[in-house]
Image (spheres, grey):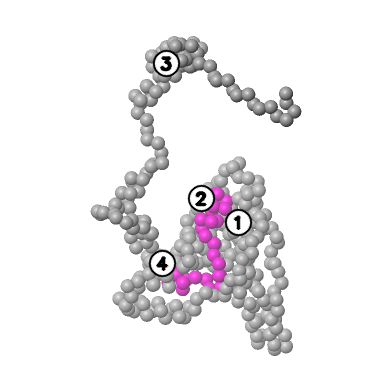
Amino acid sequence: MCAPPPPPSKQALLFQCVGCGAFHLQRLGRAAATGGRVKYSAACGPPIHPECEHCGQRHQLGGPLWAEPLHDLDFVGRILDSVTAAPSRFRTSERIRGVLSVVTEELPDVPLYHTLDQLSSTIHCNTPSLLQLRSAILHAGFRVSLSHACKNAVKTDAPASVLWDIMRCWEKECPVKRERLSETSPAFRILSVEPRLQADFTIREDANPSSRQRGLKRFQANPEANWGPRPRARPGAQGVPTPPEERRRLRQNKRKDPGEDAAHRADRLKVFPCKRFKEGTCELGEHCCYSHGPPTPTSTAAAPQDPEGTPKQSPPRPASPAGPGGD
């Protein structure tokens, strides 16, 4: 009987595309069994090309991160059984049951996840429902699960090429205006390739997880409306504070200028002569908002005079002293 291969390094580096978000993991070390002994050495990499194979953008490096299972499922199961047996023991027992139920449904060997809105925003198309995307992945022969970290997360062992083929098939049902896409954008480069996989979006029964069917509180929700940081207390405040809804209503359009009264606007514009009336092309007549009367003569500024009526003259400037060599 052959012995199982030794486990590789439990930490890995992350190579993620800045355009489409596709990621690859690079283990920090590798293990090789030789003659009953295990030899650990540095890993060789990187596992990808400098440019993304899907959109042609560059990769950014992150990590190291934990690449092994995140949870001890035996320990999680015991806690879940304990909370289910005595739900009145904890005030947040419903939330504990919901979060731990999602943890037990996660794929243990898939450390990272995709988000549904990120896949759709990359190619600028409508977002499919979570059940449709999960069903398409299951029809393609891969595993899929949710994640306790994000309600729109999709954990799957399907490669990025399969996910983009599924999104290409979805885009054919909800077409994108290609003329608005730049030729260098990730959306244009991804959609310019025909899908090799014909996705099936028929809803499957196993696409809906058990925790979702039972209506458990899987993700944290705000305990009340308008929950969050409040404004600081002001010194000398008196009376009952204004509710947040009322303050929000009073502050609507506070930066916009108030509307001008129609009568005031008409009086203000009647001061200016109508240009079309001068050209003889104004057909509004009395209904024109500008003036059709003769222009008022502008008074010319007269020179200031003294009380006797003679114009004032500026006093003579004093003669500048002669410099060296002057007469």
What residue do we see at 66% from left, 55% from top? 57
Residue 126: mark in rendering = 2
Task: Give the residue type that dot 2 points to.
Answer: Asn
> Between marks 4 and 1, how big is the CA–CA gap?
28 Å
Residue linked to disc 1: 20
Of the numbered discs 2 and 3, the one sitting upstream in the chain is 2
Q: Amino acid at mark 3?
A: Ser
Marker disc for residue 218: 4
Quadrant position of residue 56: bottom right
Q: Which residue is mark 3?
A: 291
Of tags 1 and 2, the one toward the viewer is 1
Mark with earlier residue (4, 3) = 4
Circle 1: element type: loop
* Residue type pointed to by label 1: Cys
Residue visible at 52% across and 60% down? 115
Q: Nearer the viewer, residue 95 or 62?
A: 62
Label for residue 216?
none
What secondary structure is found at the residue carrying circle 4?
A: loop
